[in-house]
Image (cartoon, grey):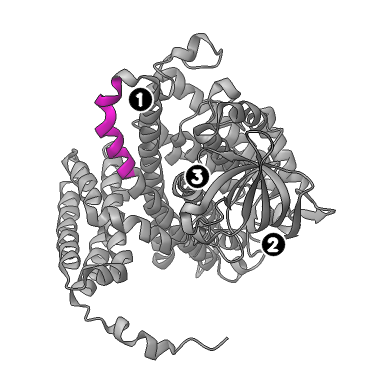
């Protein structure tokens, strides 16, 4: 039976070399729980063994059951009748298998029935699931919802909802998007009105939500407008809703890909809900935190889809004989395969580095709350990892999503005409990948989020830190990276000093973020190369083309005279009257 964890040498490589000992110690509160819970680790080595065991169980379920059933799930999908969604039987069975294996409370503290896993291990698990079936979104969604409740809900709410989520008895959804408020969440209009009953009062939801993944879930976190006079983000609050007859599932969306995941349009008709946290912080605090965690999950999804597509393409190219040789031996094909492989490994290194920063930020915050006597000592460190998390999260989401789209595109190309047919899995991977650079914030919005850290010095700070590390194995590659870094610094300074710099920066923000991403990936691959020769060769392949991309962006930005800004209206014409 296939195991999607143990058969992935690159994941095993990272798990062996991940710098997470401090995260483990913080997450386990210096292993204080070992006496209270039978399965709590006693030390870092015990924790790492536990991670491997859990990931192996997930890998076995994914390789042995979820992946073989993915084509059938894609073909049939879920159904809607009498206001109830019925998941595909294979999807339901996979959910039950994970619940029986106690995997549903992956990152939740043990006191609520969870496994207390760090985000870094969740990213590995999410990638494995996506490789098996990208439409099996429930697992990652369940963790995001549970973690948000654990971080922001009241103790009473946590005791009520988290054990049910951890057992798998309840599933969940993130209910944000509306027909007229997609990425622009501050325009949300679904209302939550408070009806006073005694001192507390209850909140009732009214309105429509659209494109809601697993909107049929037992509970949902809902972004709604709570203030009658509050406009924009400050008028929004966050609510916990448990499914009842006051919410109607109006339709299941007919989508290009991820067919196994029910995407719902919901109508709330005076549906009772509970306020989470403080009023008016629904978007600015709670939703932004939830979406950042979800964006990590989408990055993992992109890498998992790309991994599956690459493996199919490599296998096909080895078997397909053309001109008397396997097409894998043709330069045009082996160049594609090599770059696919390296781009996936680069994305994986970036995903795990991002997850590590998120873990450090979150565990330091938790530790300082439990140990206020040490709060002053870690304040600056928390600030550092918060900045890095805010930079790396949109960066990895943008990179992984765009990379997955290219890898799946190339996988079909390697298959030729056969890849266009439903007889081969790459057609499904191509359709599934297309959503990754749209939902949880388009790539364009990730650039908006990442350009601030690039221009404020956060990118330079981490690049300096990477540069100070040792890379004795490849001094020539380090020289190339440093030369490219100089071009980036020159370009950034030029853009910041431009006479109309804000408009200029906005126009060129994607190019600047891509330059920073290329440099970060180069350093991460060099760091991976410290551990074995194969990784050194992967770094060499990536860095061979990296300077030309940096130089092309630099030359365009420095030599650009506003041609597009001057001419785009004439080229595309005025907006048609509607």
The answer to whether residue 151 is above or below residue 323 is above
Q: What distance separates the C-alpha of mark 3 from that of mark 2?
A: 23 Å
Magenta span contains residue 37: no
Q: Are marks 1 and 2 in contact (CB under 8 Å)?
A: no
Is 265 on the left or on the right of 514, as rendered? Answer: right
Q: Residue at x 22, y 43 (%)?
A: 466
Please state the horizontal and vertical placement of residue 110, each as a whole percent of the image.
Answer: 55, 22
Is 392 on the left or on the right of 497, as rendered? Answer: right
Which of the labelled discs sits on residue 368, or is there none? 1
Secondary structure category for the residue under label 2: loop
Dot 3, how many residues are within 10 Å of its Cα: few (below 14), some (14-19), or many (20+)? many
Q: Which residue is mark 2?
A: 253
Q: What distance separates the C-alpha of mark 3 from that of mark 1?
A: 21 Å
Q: Which residue is mark 3?
A: 290
Please state the horizontal and vertical placement of residue 130, each as a whole percent of the image.
Answer: 56, 47
Q: Residue at x 35, y 29 (%)?
A: 364
Q: Nearer the viewer, residue 396 or 167?
A: 167
Q: Is residue 534 visible?
A: no
Displayed quadrant of residue 80: bottom right
Q: Is residue 234 visible?
A: yes
Give the dominant element type of the magenta stretch: helix, strand or loop.
helix
Quadrant that contains the C terminus: bottom right
Magenta part of the chain:
374-388
Query: Which numbered disc, 1 or 2, marks the residue closer to the eye?
Result: 1
Q: Nearer the viewer, residue 235 or 540?
A: 235
Q: Residue at x 78, y 55 (%)?
A: 79
Question: How many discs appear?
Answer: 3
Please state the horizontal and vertical placement of residue 532, each as a whole percent of the image.
Answer: 30, 38
């Amino acid at each position: 039976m296939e195991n999607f964890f143990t058969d992935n040498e690159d994941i095993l490589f990272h798990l062996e070399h991940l710098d997470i000992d401090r995260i483990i110690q913080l997450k386990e509160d210096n292993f204080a729980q070992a006496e209270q819970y039978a399965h709590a680790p006693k030390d870092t080595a015990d924790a790492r063994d536990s991670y491997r065991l859990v990931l192996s169980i997930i890998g076995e379920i994914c390789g042995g059951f979820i992946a073989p059933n993915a084509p059938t799930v894609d073909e049939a999908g879920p159904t809607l009748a009498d206001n109830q969604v019925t998941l595909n039987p294979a999807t339901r069975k996979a959910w039950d298998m994970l619940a029986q294996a106690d995997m549903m409370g992956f990152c939740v503290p043990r006191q609520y029935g969870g496994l207390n896993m760090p985000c870094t291990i969740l990213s590995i698990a999410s990638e494995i699931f996506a490789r098996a079936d990208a439409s099996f979104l429930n697992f990652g969604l369940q963790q995001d919802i549970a973690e948000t409740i654990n971080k922001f809900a009241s103790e009473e709410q946590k005791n009520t909802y988290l054990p049910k989520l951890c057992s798998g008895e309840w599933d969940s959804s993130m209910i944000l998007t509306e027909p007229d408020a997609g990425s622009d969440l501050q325009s949300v209009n679904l209302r939550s009105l408070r009806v006073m009953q005694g001192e507390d009062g209850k909140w009732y939801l009214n309105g429509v939500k659209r494109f809601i993944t697993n909107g049929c879930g037992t509970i949902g976190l809902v972004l709604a407008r709570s203030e009658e006079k509050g406009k924009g983000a400050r008028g929004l609050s966050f609510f916990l809703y448990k499914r009842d007859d006051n919410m109607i599932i109006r339709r299941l969306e007919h989508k290009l890909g991820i067919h196994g995941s029910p995407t719902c349009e919901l109508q709330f008709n005076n549906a009772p809900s509970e306020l989470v946290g403080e009023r008016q912080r629904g978007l600015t605090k709670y939703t932004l935190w939830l979406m950042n965690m979800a964006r990590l999950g989408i990055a993992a999804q992109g890498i998992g889809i790309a991994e599956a597509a690459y493996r199919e393409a490599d296998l096909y190219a080895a078997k397909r004989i053309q001109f008397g040789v396997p097409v894998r031996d043709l330069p045009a094909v082996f160049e594609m395969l090599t770059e696919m492989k390296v781009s996936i490994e680069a994305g994986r290194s970036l995903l795990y580095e991002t997850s590590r920063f998120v873990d450090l930020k979150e565990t330091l915050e938790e530790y300082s709350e439990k140990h206020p006597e040490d709060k002053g000592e870690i304040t600056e460190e928390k600030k550092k990892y918060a900045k890095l998390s805010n930079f790396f999260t949109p960066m990895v989401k943008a990179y992984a999503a765009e990379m997955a789209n290219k890898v799946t595109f190339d996988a079909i190309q390697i298959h030729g005409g056969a890849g266009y047919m439903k007889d081969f899995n790459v057609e499904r991977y191509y359709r599934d990948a297309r959503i990754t650079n749209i939902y949880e914030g388009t790539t364009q919005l990730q650039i908006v989020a990442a350009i601030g850290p690039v221009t404020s010095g956060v990118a330079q700070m981490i690049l300096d830190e990477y540069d100070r590390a040792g890379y004795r194995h490849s001094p020539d590659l380090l020289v190339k990276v440093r030369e490219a870094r100089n071009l980036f610094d020159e370009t950034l300074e030029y853009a910041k000093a431009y006479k109309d710099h804000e408009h200029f920066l906005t126009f060129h923000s994607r190019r600047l973020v891509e330059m920073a991403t290329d440099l970060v990936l180069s350093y991460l691959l060099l760091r991976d190369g410290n551990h074995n020769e194969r990784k050194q060769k992967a770094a060499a392949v990536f860095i061979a083309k990296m300077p030309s991309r940096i130089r092309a962006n630099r030359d365009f930005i420095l030599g650009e005279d506003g041609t597009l800004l001057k001419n785009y209206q004439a080229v595309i014409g005025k907006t048609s009257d509607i």
